[in-house]
Image (cartoon, helix red, strand yellow):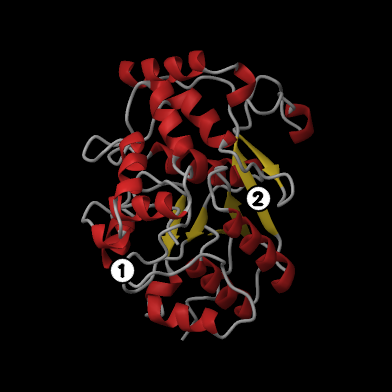
Amino acid sequence: MKSPFLIEGPAVISFSGGRTSAYMLRRILDEGLHPDVHVLFCNTGKEYQETLTFVDQIARRWGVDVHWLEYERQELPKYKSDDVRIIAERFRASRPKAAWMYRPRQWANAGLDDSRERGFREVTFESASRKGEPFENFIAMSGLPNPAFRTCTTEMKVRVMKRWMLERCYEKWDMVMGIRADEPRRVMKLKRSPPERWEHVMPLNEAKVDEARIISFWKAQDFDLGLPIDDVLGTYRGNCDGCILKATGKLLRIESEEPGRLKWWQDIERDTGSLFRRDRPSYRQLRVLAKRVEDPSACATDDDLGDCFCHD
Protein backbone atom coordinates (compact mmCIF):
# COMPACT_ATOMS: atom_id res chain seq x y z
CA MET A 1 0.00 0.00 0.00
CA LYS A 2 1.08 3.56 -0.70
CA SER A 3 2.25 5.39 2.41
CA PRO A 4 -0.05 8.28 3.38
CA PHE A 5 3.14 10.31 3.88
CA LEU A 6 4.17 9.94 0.24
CA ILE A 7 2.99 13.30 -1.11
CA GLU A 8 3.58 13.60 -4.85
CA GLY A 9 2.27 17.13 -5.42
CA PRO A 10 1.47 19.67 -6.36
CA ALA A 11 0.87 20.28 -2.67
CA VAL A 12 1.28 22.66 0.24
CA ILE A 13 2.47 21.32 3.56
CA SER A 14 0.80 23.61 6.08
CA PHE A 15 3.48 23.90 8.75
CA SER A 16 2.09 25.60 11.85
CA GLY A 17 5.34 25.46 13.81
CA GLY A 18 3.95 22.99 16.35
CA ARG A 19 5.06 19.49 17.29
CA THR A 20 2.28 17.76 15.36
CA SER A 21 2.88 19.39 12.00
CA ALA A 22 6.64 19.06 12.51
CA TYR A 23 6.26 15.31 13.10
CA MET A 24 4.12 15.09 9.95
CA LEU A 25 6.79 16.94 8.00
CA ARG A 26 9.46 14.53 9.25
CA ARG A 27 7.45 11.54 8.02
CA ILE A 28 6.93 13.20 4.64
CA LEU A 29 10.64 13.98 4.34
CA ASP A 30 11.42 10.34 5.09
CA GLU A 31 9.38 9.36 2.02
CA GLY A 32 11.17 11.97 -0.12
CA LEU A 33 10.04 15.55 -0.73
CA HIS A 34 8.88 15.98 -4.32
CA PRO A 35 9.70 19.22 -6.22
CA ASP A 36 6.05 20.32 -6.39
CA VAL A 37 5.55 19.96 -2.62
CA HIS A 38 6.12 23.23 -0.74
CA VAL A 39 6.48 23.79 3.02
CA LEU A 40 4.79 27.06 4.08
CA PHE A 41 4.82 28.72 7.50
CA CYS A 42 2.54 31.75 7.98
CA ASN A 43 3.66 34.11 10.73
CA THR A 44 1.11 36.44 12.35
CA GLY A 45 3.62 38.25 14.54
CA LYS A 46 1.96 36.86 17.69
CA GLU A 47 3.66 33.47 17.77
CA TYR A 48 5.99 32.71 20.63
CA GLN A 49 9.69 33.17 19.96
CA GLU A 50 10.06 29.46 20.77
CA THR A 51 7.81 28.64 17.80
CA LEU A 52 9.88 30.74 15.42
CA THR A 53 13.09 29.17 16.72
CA PHE A 54 11.60 25.69 16.27
CA VAL A 55 10.65 26.39 12.65
CA ASP A 56 14.16 27.68 11.98
CA GLN A 57 15.71 24.62 13.62
CA ILE A 58 13.54 22.29 11.53
CA ALA A 59 14.72 23.96 8.34
CA ARG A 60 18.39 23.89 9.32
CA ARG A 61 18.60 20.48 10.96
CA TRP A 62 16.46 18.64 8.41
CA GLY A 63 17.66 20.51 5.34
CA VAL A 64 14.20 21.56 4.19
CA ASP A 65 13.24 24.83 2.50
CA VAL A 66 10.55 26.44 4.67
CA HIS A 67 8.91 29.49 3.11
CA TRP A 68 8.07 32.14 5.72
CA LEU A 69 5.02 34.21 4.74
CA GLU A 70 3.26 37.17 6.36
CA TYR A 71 -0.04 38.85 5.55
CA GLU A 72 0.44 42.30 4.02
CA ARG A 73 -2.39 44.44 2.61
CA GLN A 74 -2.91 48.12 1.93
CA GLU A 75 -6.01 48.06 -0.24
CA LEU A 76 -9.22 47.82 1.76
CA PRO A 77 -11.38 44.79 0.94
CA LYS A 78 -15.06 45.11 0.13
CA TYR A 79 -16.70 44.93 3.53
CA LYS A 80 -19.68 42.63 3.91
CA SER A 81 -20.81 44.24 7.14
CA ASP A 82 -21.07 47.80 8.44
CA ASP A 83 -19.93 46.55 11.85
CA VAL A 84 -16.67 45.22 10.37
CA ARG A 85 -16.08 48.48 8.50
CA ILE A 86 -16.69 50.61 11.60
CA ILE A 87 -14.37 48.51 13.79
CA ALA A 88 -11.59 48.60 11.18
CA GLU A 89 -11.94 52.35 10.70
CA ARG A 90 -11.90 52.95 14.46
CA PHE A 91 -8.70 50.92 14.78
CA ARG A 92 -6.96 52.75 11.92
CA ALA A 93 -7.91 56.09 13.44
CA SER A 94 -6.57 55.08 16.86
CA ARG A 95 -2.99 54.50 15.72
CA PRO A 96 -0.42 56.16 13.50
CA LYS A 97 -0.46 54.72 10.01
CA ALA A 98 3.04 53.30 10.39
CA ALA A 99 1.89 51.22 13.36
CA TRP A 100 -0.26 48.95 11.22
CA MET A 101 1.16 49.45 7.72
CA TYR A 102 4.51 48.04 8.66
CA ARG A 103 6.21 48.13 5.27
CA PRO A 104 6.05 50.43 2.24
CA ARG A 105 4.69 49.05 -1.03
CA GLN A 106 7.32 47.16 -2.98
CA TRP A 107 5.36 45.26 -5.58
CA ALA A 108 8.20 45.63 -8.08
CA ASN A 109 10.22 43.17 -6.00
CA ALA A 110 7.49 40.59 -6.52
CA GLY A 111 7.39 41.15 -10.26
CA LEU A 112 3.77 42.30 -10.08
CA ASP A 113 1.96 45.21 -11.66
CA ASP A 114 1.25 48.14 -9.32
CA SER A 115 -2.48 47.70 -9.90
CA ARG A 116 -2.45 44.31 -8.21
CA GLU A 117 -1.81 43.74 -4.53
CA ARG A 118 0.23 40.69 -3.64
CA GLY A 119 -1.41 40.23 -0.24
CA PHE A 120 1.64 38.83 1.53
CA ARG A 121 5.37 39.20 1.87
CA GLU A 122 8.12 36.62 2.22
CA VAL A 123 10.40 36.92 5.23
CA THR A 124 13.05 34.92 7.06
CA PHE A 125 13.60 33.86 10.65
CA GLU A 126 15.66 37.00 11.17
CA SER A 127 13.24 39.44 9.51
CA ALA A 128 9.96 37.87 10.66
CA SER A 129 7.59 40.13 12.62
CA ARG A 130 7.52 39.61 16.37
CA LYS A 131 5.26 42.40 17.64
CA GLY A 132 1.95 41.54 15.97
CA GLU A 133 2.48 43.74 12.90
CA PRO A 134 0.80 41.42 10.34
CA PHE A 135 -2.10 40.86 12.76
CA GLU A 136 -2.55 44.62 13.23
CA ASN A 137 -2.40 45.13 9.46
CA PHE A 138 -5.16 42.52 9.09
CA ILE A 139 -7.34 44.16 11.76
CA ALA A 140 -6.92 47.56 10.09
CA MET A 141 -8.20 46.00 6.85
CA SER A 142 -10.90 43.62 8.09
CA GLY A 143 -11.78 44.33 11.72
CA LEU A 144 -11.69 41.82 14.56
CA PRO A 145 -12.03 38.07 14.07
CA ASN A 146 -14.35 36.11 16.35
CA PRO A 147 -15.09 32.43 17.01
CA ALA A 148 -17.90 32.38 14.43
CA PHE A 149 -15.87 34.17 11.75
CA ARG A 150 -12.24 33.17 12.09
CA THR A 151 -11.06 35.63 9.52
CA CYS A 152 -7.60 35.77 11.11
CA THR A 153 -7.00 32.18 10.01
CA THR A 154 -8.73 32.64 6.66
CA GLU A 155 -6.89 35.82 5.71
CA MET A 156 -3.49 35.50 7.38
CA LYS A 157 -2.95 31.82 6.66
CA VAL A 158 -5.33 30.11 4.20
CA ARG A 159 -5.51 32.90 1.62
CA VAL A 160 -1.86 33.81 2.01
CA MET A 161 -0.89 30.24 1.08
CA LYS A 162 -3.42 30.29 -1.75
CA ARG A 163 -1.94 33.50 -3.17
CA TRP A 164 1.56 32.05 -2.90
CA MET A 165 0.54 29.01 -4.95
CA LEU A 166 -1.41 31.01 -7.53
CA GLU A 167 1.59 33.29 -7.97
CA ARG A 168 3.47 30.18 -9.09
CA CYS A 169 0.73 29.31 -11.60
CA TYR A 170 -0.71 26.30 -9.80
CA GLU A 171 -4.39 25.74 -10.53
CA LYS A 172 -5.09 22.83 -8.17
CA TRP A 173 -3.17 21.31 -5.30
CA ASP A 174 -3.37 19.25 -2.11
CA MET A 175 -3.40 21.01 1.26
CA VAL A 176 -1.52 18.70 3.64
CA MET A 177 -2.51 19.32 7.26
CA GLY A 178 -1.37 17.96 10.61
CA ILE A 179 -4.69 16.59 11.84
CA ARG A 180 -4.24 13.59 14.12
CA ALA A 181 -6.36 10.45 14.36
CA ASP A 182 -7.50 11.49 17.86
CA GLU A 183 -9.08 14.69 16.50
CA PRO A 184 -12.22 13.29 14.81
CA ARG A 185 -14.14 16.56 15.03
CA ARG A 186 -11.48 18.42 13.08
CA VAL A 187 -11.27 15.60 10.53
CA MET A 188 -15.01 15.67 9.90
CA LYS A 189 -15.07 19.46 9.72
CA LEU A 190 -12.43 19.52 7.00
CA LYS A 191 -14.14 16.74 5.08
CA ARG A 192 -17.30 18.87 5.03
CA SER A 193 -15.44 21.96 3.81
CA PRO A 194 -16.74 23.33 0.50
CA PRO A 195 -14.60 22.70 -2.60
CA GLU A 196 -11.72 25.11 -3.18
CA ARG A 197 -8.66 24.92 -5.36
CA TRP A 198 -7.26 22.26 -3.06
CA GLU A 199 -8.15 18.94 -1.46
CA HIS A 200 -7.48 18.44 2.25
CA VAL A 201 -5.00 15.66 2.89
CA MET A 202 -4.51 14.40 6.45
CA PRO A 203 -1.77 11.73 6.51
CA LEU A 204 -1.58 11.58 10.33
CA ASN A 205 -5.25 10.64 10.48
CA GLU A 206 -4.81 8.03 7.75
CA ALA A 207 -1.81 6.54 9.56
CA LYS A 208 -3.71 6.46 12.91
CA VAL A 209 -1.14 8.71 14.59
CA ASP A 210 -2.29 10.15 17.92
CA GLU A 211 -0.87 12.72 20.33
CA ALA A 212 0.88 10.12 22.49
CA ARG A 213 2.98 8.90 19.57
CA ILE A 214 3.99 12.45 18.67
CA ILE A 215 5.01 13.31 22.23
CA SER A 216 7.01 10.09 22.39
CA PHE A 217 8.76 10.97 19.13
CA TRP A 218 9.87 14.38 20.35
CA LYS A 219 11.10 13.03 23.69
CA ALA A 220 13.53 10.89 21.71
CA GLN A 221 14.92 13.82 19.67
CA ASP A 222 17.87 16.04 20.53
CA PHE A 223 15.77 19.19 20.01
CA ASP A 224 12.13 20.12 20.55
CA LEU A 225 9.64 22.96 20.60
CA GLY A 226 10.57 24.93 23.70
CA LEU A 227 7.01 25.29 25.01
CA PRO A 228 5.76 23.32 28.03
CA ILE A 229 3.10 20.60 27.97
CA ASP A 230 0.74 20.72 30.96
CA ASP A 231 -1.15 17.62 32.13
CA VAL A 232 -4.41 19.60 32.25
CA LEU A 233 -3.98 22.40 29.71
CA GLY A 234 -1.81 20.69 27.12
CA THR A 235 0.47 22.93 25.02
CA TYR A 236 -1.30 26.00 26.29
CA ARG A 237 1.16 28.62 24.98
CA GLY A 238 1.32 27.86 21.24
CA ASN A 239 0.63 29.17 18.61
CA CYS A 240 -0.64 32.79 18.83
CA ASP A 241 0.06 33.66 22.46
CA GLY A 242 -3.42 35.01 23.34
CA CYS A 243 -5.45 33.27 20.62
CA ILE A 244 -9.17 34.00 20.86
CA LEU A 245 -9.94 30.27 20.67
CA LYS A 246 -7.98 29.38 23.81
CA ALA A 247 -9.83 28.43 26.97
CA THR A 248 -10.05 30.98 29.77
CA GLY A 249 -7.92 28.73 31.97
CA LYS A 250 -5.11 28.72 29.41
CA LEU A 251 -5.11 32.50 29.07
CA LEU A 252 -5.11 32.98 32.86
CA ARG A 253 -2.14 30.61 33.15
CA ILE A 254 -0.26 32.47 30.40
CA GLU A 255 -0.81 35.90 31.96
CA SER A 256 0.02 34.69 35.47
CA GLU A 257 3.32 33.20 34.27
CA GLU A 258 4.16 36.07 31.92
CA PRO A 259 2.54 39.27 33.19
CA GLY A 260 1.82 41.57 30.27
CA ARG A 261 1.63 38.82 27.65
CA LEU A 262 -2.06 39.60 27.01
CA LYS A 263 -1.60 43.38 26.92
CA TRP A 264 -1.44 43.46 23.12
CA TRP A 265 -4.85 41.78 22.95
CA GLN A 266 -6.22 44.15 25.58
CA ASP A 267 -4.96 47.15 23.61
CA ILE A 268 -6.57 45.87 20.39
CA GLU A 269 -9.95 45.57 22.11
CA ARG A 270 -9.53 49.08 23.53
CA ASP A 271 -8.56 50.64 20.20
CA THR A 272 -11.33 48.96 18.22
CA GLY A 273 -13.96 49.53 20.90
CA SER A 274 -15.02 45.92 20.51
CA LEU A 275 -14.30 42.42 21.85
CA PHE A 276 -12.83 39.33 20.27
CA ARG A 277 -15.31 37.21 22.25
CA ARG A 278 -18.49 38.12 24.12
CA ASP A 279 -18.96 34.80 25.90
CA ARG A 280 -16.19 35.37 28.45
CA PRO A 281 -14.26 38.21 30.18
CA SER A 282 -12.44 40.77 28.07
CA TYR A 283 -8.64 40.60 27.87
CA ARG A 284 -8.44 43.49 30.33
CA GLN A 285 -10.57 41.51 32.78
CA LEU A 286 -8.53 38.37 32.17
CA ARG A 287 -5.36 40.24 33.12
CA VAL A 288 -7.00 41.39 36.37
CA LEU A 289 -8.26 37.88 37.15
CA ALA A 290 -4.82 36.38 36.50
CA LYS A 291 -3.43 38.37 39.44
CA ARG A 292 -6.09 37.01 41.79
CA VAL A 293 -6.23 33.33 40.88
CA GLU A 294 -3.79 31.20 42.85
CA ASP A 295 -3.90 28.18 40.52
CA PRO A 296 -4.94 29.03 36.93
CA SER A 297 -4.76 25.34 35.98
CA ALA A 298 -7.69 24.75 38.34
CA CYS A 299 -9.73 27.12 36.17
CA ALA A 300 -9.98 24.62 33.32
CA THR A 301 -13.08 25.58 31.36
CA ASP A 302 -15.06 24.22 28.45
CA ASP A 303 -14.69 27.35 26.31
CA ASP A 304 -11.62 26.11 24.43
CA LEU A 305 -12.29 26.33 20.67
CA GLY A 306 -8.81 25.23 19.61
CA ASP A 307 -9.77 23.49 16.39
CA CYS A 308 -8.22 26.27 14.32
CA PHE A 309 -6.24 25.93 11.06
CA CYS A 310 -3.15 27.06 12.99
CA HIS A 311 -3.50 24.29 15.55
CA ASP A 312 -0.42 22.46 16.89
| Of the pair 111 and 252, the residue shown nearer to us | 252
Disc 2: CA contacts within 10 A as few (<14), some (14-19) or many (>=20): many
Percent x, y of residue 28 = 57, 74
The residue at the far right in this view is 109
Quick one: label 2 or label 1, which is nearer the N terminus?
2
Alpha carbon separation for disc pair 2 and 1 = 32 Å
Residue at the (65%, 50%) spot, across then down: 68
Q: Secondary structure at mark 1?
A: loop
Q: Residue at x 56, y 67 (%)?
A: 225
Q: Which residue is mark 1?
A: 232
Q: Is residue 47 above or below residue 70?
A: below
Query: On the image, which quarter does residue 143 sit in?
Result: top left
- Count neighbours of disc 1 (C-alpha within 10 A) and say few if under 14, some if 14 to 19, many if 20 or more: few
Decide: marks 2, 1 in contact (CB < 8 A)?
A: no
Q: In this rendering, does residue 172 appear at all?
A: yes
Specify the amino acid type for callout 2. Answer: Trp
Q: Give the SS element for disc 2.
A: strand
Q: Nearer the viewer, mark 2 or mark 1?
A: 1
Q: What residue does disc 2 label?
A: 68
Q: Position of residue 298 (x, y in %)?
A: 25, 62
Residue 1 vertical placement versus 76 (above, below): below
Q: How many marks?
A: 2
Q: Quadrant of residue 286?
A: top left
Quarter the C terminus occupies: bottom left
Provide residue 64's location: percent of width, then percent of height. Answer: 70, 66
Residue closest to the eye, 98 or 155: 98
